[in-house]
Amino acid sequence: MPALIPSWRFFSTITPSVRIEYVITQLDALTNADWQEFRPRATQLTSSAVIKRLLWNPHWNETLFLVTCAERLISAPSQHSIDEINTRLLRQLTATPRPPAPSQYLYFRLAFWERQGIELTKTIEYVSEGTPIGGAVNDL
Amino acid sequence: MTFDTALRASEILMALAFIQQSAEHLTAAPRERIIFALRIILSALLLAHLQTAWVLLGLLVLGLWALHLFQGPYNGGSDRMSLLILACLCAIAWVPDPIWQHTIYAYLGFQVGMSYFISGWVKLKNPEWRSGLALADVFHFSAYPVSEDLRRWANAHRILTLLSWGVILFEVLFPLAFLSQTLLMIALILAAGFHLSNACLFGLNRFFWIWLAAYPAILWLQDRLI
């Protein structure tokens, strides 16, 4: 039914905005962990990059899907949202020239940004269990 | 515009939008790749006007499969519009009665108008949109601006208030464009420009292509009614 009678309430309210942060570390070694934002946006985009993204924008659209998964994880927690975030993070993080060691673990957390008065505040609302890099890579 | 011409224009524009959307999934995990590779093949068949009714049914099945895979839309509103257009075109292909075909296509045209009106109405009711604060928040801390440089726009309060009112008034008054074909053409060009700017500023490229696919329906409906 939502396909036949869709909701068109785009941007009706501006809610706290989520960022996915991750760290790859030893099991449960999260004290003083160096959390990184997943796919931070570019400082600046050239006009040609903007035009190219009209036709080819897979990473950005995947990142928006992960934002949806993160919001679902808070409003209606499910293993599907956790798996989607873990799988897509691991696919990108292991596809580098220097992938993390299989003995390490991936953790992610959800940081929500919102404006309170004139100040921006950041609240961590979820920290994942560790996912073993070695065990997960074979499933990607 | 005749019904057949408008319908074919919708099919072609939707097929092109589906190919663009689906190509972006071809670097994803294998199960996702399979669905969207099949979607590209079926969209190409739709472009070629081969077995259109069966192709549309196949695309609808793939659309529902994708909904299941992602446990909901992958790309929010653009997926909702994609499914709406697809469901309407598929129903038109399978119902034999021309009156029902016209009614379903008219419903699609009506929903295009509603997509602007409702979107504007919910903003009009929100004091933060009326003051420009909501749009400032979109630039300030939302996930949408495509670059950090764009976040500086959050400080341009006067311009953002004007932009907010421009968007609200355009969306709320959109149904009035129905009164004349020229007015509707101008409104749709402005609307396409609005989607294009959203694609450039917020990376919402899929919205731009799929909304274009619905425009023939509203043009046909206006021509039919007025």
Image (spheres, rainbow, N blue to C red):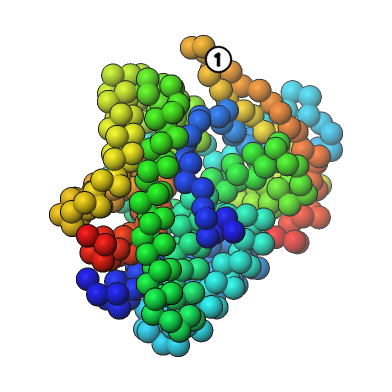
Foreground pick, A22 / B197: B197
Q: Residues within 10 Å of mark 1 (few under 14, many from 20)?
A: few
Which quadrant of the rendered structure holds the C terminus of chain A?
bottom right
Q: Is residue A102 visible?
A: no
Q: Is residue B142 left or right of residue B225?
A: right
Q: Is residue B103 visible?
A: yes
Q: Residue furthest right?
A: A28
Which quadrant of the rendered structure holds the N terminus of chain A?
bottom right
Which x, y percent locates residue B54?
51, 84
Query: Circle 1 sits on which residue?
Result: A116
Q: Residue furthest bottom?
A: B51
- Give residue B171's quadrant in the image: top left
Three-letter amino acid code at disc 1?
Answer: Gln
Of all chains, the one bearing label 1 is: A
Foreground pick, B102 / A70: B102
Question: Which residue: 43% across, 21% down?
Answer: B127
Q: Is residue B182 above or below residue B160?
A: below
Question: Which residue: 67% across, 47% down?
Answer: A85
Q: Is residue B110 left or right of residue A106?
A: left
Q: How many marks?
A: 1
Which x, y percent locates residue B128?
44, 22
Question: Which residue: 51% across, 63% down?
Answer: B83
Which x, y percent locates residue A36?
62, 33
Label 1 residue SS: strand
Question: Which residue: 37% across, 45% down?
Answer: B116
Foreground pick, A5 / B57: A5
